[in-house]
Image: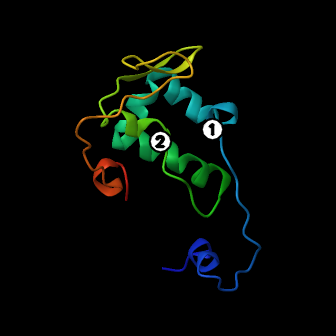
């Protein structure tokens, strides 16, 4: 497999200088907004078909060399026993948090190891 992205990661010469794009798809991709209008954020992160679709959108539309798997930074709090939701107009909410602002996350009595590859059902 010939990949400009992998060559750049391996510090091999490439035909163009690699650049890094951070993406907020909801701000500019109509295709993302159409999917987001039909599905909640957690559903998009947890359903392999939806996560793969929104991950690959910029690759196909913008013709970039690689993409970061669509996910949210707060996903690991659920296996820790916290109840997470995304409220329209408000953002992420943890419903069973303890303490007062600033939020303190309770230390679980028993910590379950979370392996990235098994916790990410939409990886390839």
**Residue 75 percent across, percent down from the top left:** 41, 37
Q: Which mark is residue 25?
A: 1
10 Å crowding of disc 2: few (<14), some (14-19), many (20+) = some
Which residue is pictured at 70% across the width and 85% down the height? 13
Give above or below for 30 relative to 101.
Answer: below
Q: Can you see residue 121?
A: no
Determine which residue is flagged by label 2.
71
Of residues 48 and 101, the one nearer the viewer is 101
**Residue 78 percent across, percent down from the top left:** 34, 32
Give above or below for 96 relative to 4.
Answer: above
Give above or below for 3 relative to 33.
Answer: below
Which residue is pictured at 39% across the width and 40% down the height? 76
Of residues 122 and 72, the one nearer the viewer is 72
Contact? badges 2 and 1 (CB < 8 Å): no
Looking at the rendered structure, the number of numbered marks drawn on it comes to 2
Which of the two discs, 2 and 1, labels the residue nearer the N terminus?
Answer: 1
Extreme-right residue of the structure:
17
- The quarter of the picture where the C terminus appears is bottom left
């Amino acid at each position: 497999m010939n990949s400009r992205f992998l060559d750049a990661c391996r510090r091999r010469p490439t035909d163009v200088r690699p650049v890094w794009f951070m993406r907020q798809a909801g701000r500019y991709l109509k295709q993302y907004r159409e999917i987001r209008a039909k599905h909640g954020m957690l559903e998009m992160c947890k359903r392999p078909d939806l996560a793969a679709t929104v991950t690959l959108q910029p690759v196909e539309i913008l013709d970039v060399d690689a993409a970061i798997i669509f996910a949210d930074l707060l996903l690991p709090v659920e296996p820790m026993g916290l109840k997470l939701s995304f409220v329209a107009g408000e953002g992420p909410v943890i419903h069973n948090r303890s303490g007062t602002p600033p939020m303190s996350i309770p230390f679980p009595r028993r910590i379950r190891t979370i392996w990235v590859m098994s916790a990410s059902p939409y990886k390839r």
